[in-house]
Image (cartoon, rainbow, N blue to C red):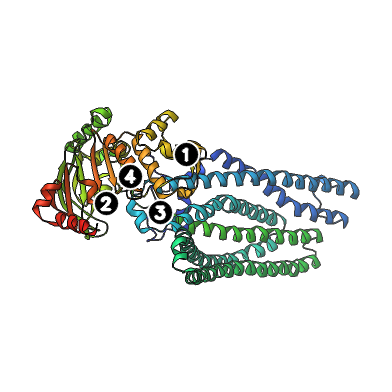
């Protein structure tokens, strides 16, 4: 079982809201994964900050040397004006070189750490999403998930790159400049420092408003992406029913809502910048006014006043940058809250190792039996299926399966029939453990499927759906699906299911590249690959959900012959609407509204004159 990400364990639902500091602490484990690079980038901040704080002092000291003012540093006293200026210029050049050298290296390290952290978060999020039950995907738009995995994760990465580390740099700069100012002249220093407090209050207010607007903007972006994905996926229906203009107007409306929310974020972001500019100008004006008075009364030298003017500019530059980075962090925290909605989704279907600590003695014994079953060779697997009073609902108490209780014997061929909505496909989903029963249990060879590893369960249960899904890639990879089958094994499975001739007729045979969803193949050709995909795994239980519905008559006869061989010695469940294709199965289960109402072979059910006989007569009459 894949371990959960650091974000998964502590994160909670969006309500109650967690403060920013707690949100940041939840990201710290990702920073620890790259602690060496992170520490190095932090160490490089020290020479950068010190060099930046020294530069105004050196410039102010140069002016004092030129004016022969009394506050000359000790190491410059007794030297000529030219010699003192040369020393100061050399020191100033050294600070410039230090900043030029370390800014590039430190910036590269920060960006690298940010990209590594972004990749880690994206991996953990994708890993968590793939472990979620199908029920989650039934209610979650794909576009919403894509937004979480792309733009939201990028925003999280910015928290570390331009955000958190940058804020540490800005705070260190402010502290270093403040210390240098107080050592130079405490009255001017105190005036500048006091002006930081109203500035901080305004920044916090605007950032809170920005946070709310940014959350709304990202929600609108999710809706925008969902609409886009839905329309592209269903472009055939859009064009067939001439919905282009209607869909364009709908998309334009959603797009305008998104633009309005983005405009709100821009407004608050701009308000922060404008506020900082005004306060910075007021601060410089205050330094000039108070500093001029001190210079006139001989309490301050002109060089020190120039230094303070530079200090005022440099003090507010990191604060301005701090505000910009704070905006980035707010966007990142918004992303944390949104990703939290996904990562806090419980993993409903787990392997038994994940719940061992909560099991009773009887359950532990059952687990031991399951482990024995998993270690049993495939040829020793019997394939008995038993539903024990199974109830199931997709939502609330709207049950689509009601008290199903039956046993399918090893090697038996059983067909499921019934009207649309009878629960046939739901039975298959429960058997494959894509969903958990609401009540009751499902056993294979006497072992509850919840006590089996999912990989083992699905290794022994092969499913061929009505519509085969293909991934972008070549033919052989779509048959192997990531398992380490050799080309000989793939070819053998294709021959066994009589689809080798079709594959070899493709331009590059087994190496033919398939487009996304296999759009360069027909529905029937995609279905043929699904047969080979199931055959290569040699499952002991085979499920056919209208598997031959998309095949033409001649191809269906060819595949049916292969299926007869494939089903030999295996337990099989067949879902079919064409009753003529299931006459030779051992038993037929007739379902209606989630209940098993009839059971028997073809002849027995016809003699009963029930629902099966009615369906059969209707089809015969139609033919």
Q: Which residue is mark 2?
A: 425
| Residue shown at the point (65%, 43%) measured from the top left | 44
Above or below for 272 versus 77: below
| Residue shown at the point (38%, 42%) measured from the top left | 528
Q: Which residue is mark 1?
A: 505
Q: Position of residue 234 (x, y in %)?
A: 44, 60
- Label 1: few (<14), some or many (≥20) within 10 Å? few
Q: Position of residue 590 (x, y in %)?
A: 17, 52
Asked whether the beta carbons under mark 4 and mark 2 sit within 8 Å of each other, the answer is no
Q: Which residue is mark 4?
A: 556
Circle 2: element type: helix
- Label 3: few (<14), some or many (≥20) within 10 Å? many
| Residue shown at the point (30%, 41%) measured from the top left | 560
| Residue 107 falls left or right of residue 519 | right
Q: Can residue 429 be seen?
A: yes
Mark with earlier residue (1, 4): 1
> Which-is-in-front pick, marks 4 and 3?
4
Distance of mark 3 from mark 1, alpha carbons? 44 Å
Q: Which residue is mark 3?
A: 342
> Which-is-in-front pick, marks 2 and 1?
1
């Amino acid at each position: 079982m894949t371990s959960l990400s650091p974000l998964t364990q502590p994160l909670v639902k969006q309500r109650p809201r967690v403060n920013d500091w707690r949100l940041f602490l939840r990201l710290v484990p990702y920073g620890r994964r790259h602690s060496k690079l992170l520490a190095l980038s932090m160490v490089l901040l020290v020479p950068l900050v010190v060099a930046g704080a020294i530069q105004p002092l050196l410039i102010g000291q140069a002016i004092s040397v030129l004016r022969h003012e009394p506050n000359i540093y000790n190491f410059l006293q007794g030297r000529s004006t030219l010699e003192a200026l040369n020393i100061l210029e050399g020191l100033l050049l050294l600070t410039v070189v230090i900043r030029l050298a370390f800014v590039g290296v430190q910036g590269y390290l920060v960006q690298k750490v940010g990209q590594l952290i972004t990749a880690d978060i994206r991996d953990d999020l994708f890993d968590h999403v793939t472990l979620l039950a199908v029920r989650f995907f039934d209610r979650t738009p794909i576009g919403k998930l894509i937004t979480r995995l792309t733009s939201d994760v990028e925003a999280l990465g910015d928290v570390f790159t331009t955000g958190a580390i940058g804020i540490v740099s800005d705070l260190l700069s402010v502290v270093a400049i403040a210390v240098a100012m107080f050592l130079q002249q405490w009255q001017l220093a105190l005036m500048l420092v006091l002006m930081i407090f109203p500035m901080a209050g305004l920044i916090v207010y605007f950032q809170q408003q920005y946070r709310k607007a940014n959350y709304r903007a990202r929600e609108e972006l999710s809706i925008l992406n969902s609409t886009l994905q839905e329309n592209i996926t269903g472009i055939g229906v859009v064009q067939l029913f001439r919905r282009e203009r209607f869909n364009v107007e709908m998309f334009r409306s959603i797009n305008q809502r998104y633009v309005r929310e983005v405009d709100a974020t821009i407004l608050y972001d701009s308000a922060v910048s404008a506020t900082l500019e005004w306060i910075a100008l007021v601060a410089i004006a205050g330094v000039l006014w108070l500093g001029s008075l001190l210079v006139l009364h001989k309490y301050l030298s002109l060089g020190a006043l120039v230094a303070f003017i530079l200090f005022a500019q440099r003090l507010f530059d990191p604060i301005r940058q701090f505000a910009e980075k704070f905006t980035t962090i707010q966007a990142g925290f918004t992303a944390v809250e949104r990703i939290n909605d996904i990562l806090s989704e419980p993993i409903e279907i787990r392997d038994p190792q994940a719940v061992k600590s909560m099991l009773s003695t009887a359950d532990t014994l059952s687990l031991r039996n399951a482990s024995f079953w998993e270690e049993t060779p495939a040829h020793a697997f019997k394939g008995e299926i038993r539903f024990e009073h199974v109830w199931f609902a997709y939502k609330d108490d709207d049950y689509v399966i009601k008290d199903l209780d039956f046993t399918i014997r090893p090697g038996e061929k059983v067909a499921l029939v019934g009207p649309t909505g009878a629960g046939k496909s739901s039975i298959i989903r429960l058997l494959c453990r894509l969903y958990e029963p609401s009540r009751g249990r499902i056993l294979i060879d006497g072992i509850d499927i919840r006590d089996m590893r999912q990989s083992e369960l699905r290794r022994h249960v092969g499913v061929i759906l009505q519509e085969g899904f293909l991934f972008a890639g070549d033919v052989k990879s779509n048959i192997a699906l990531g398992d380490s089958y050799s080309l000989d094994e793939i070819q053998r499975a294709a021959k066994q299911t009589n689809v080798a001739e079709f594959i070899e007729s493709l331009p590059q045979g087994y190496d033919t590249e398939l487009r996304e969803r296999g759009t360069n193949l027909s529905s029937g050709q995609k279905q043929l690959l699904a047969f080979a995909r199931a055959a290569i795994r040699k499952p002991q239980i085979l499920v056919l959900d209208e598997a031959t519905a998309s095949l033409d008559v001649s191809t269906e006869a060819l595949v049916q012959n292969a299926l007869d061989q494939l089903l030999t010695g295996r337990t099989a469940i067949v879902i079919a609407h064409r009753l003529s294709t299931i006459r030779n199965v051992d038993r037929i289960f007739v379902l209606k509204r989630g209940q098993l109402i009839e059971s028997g072979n073809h002849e027995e059910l016809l003699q009963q004159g029930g629902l099966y006989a009615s369906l059969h007569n209707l089809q015969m009459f139609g033919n």
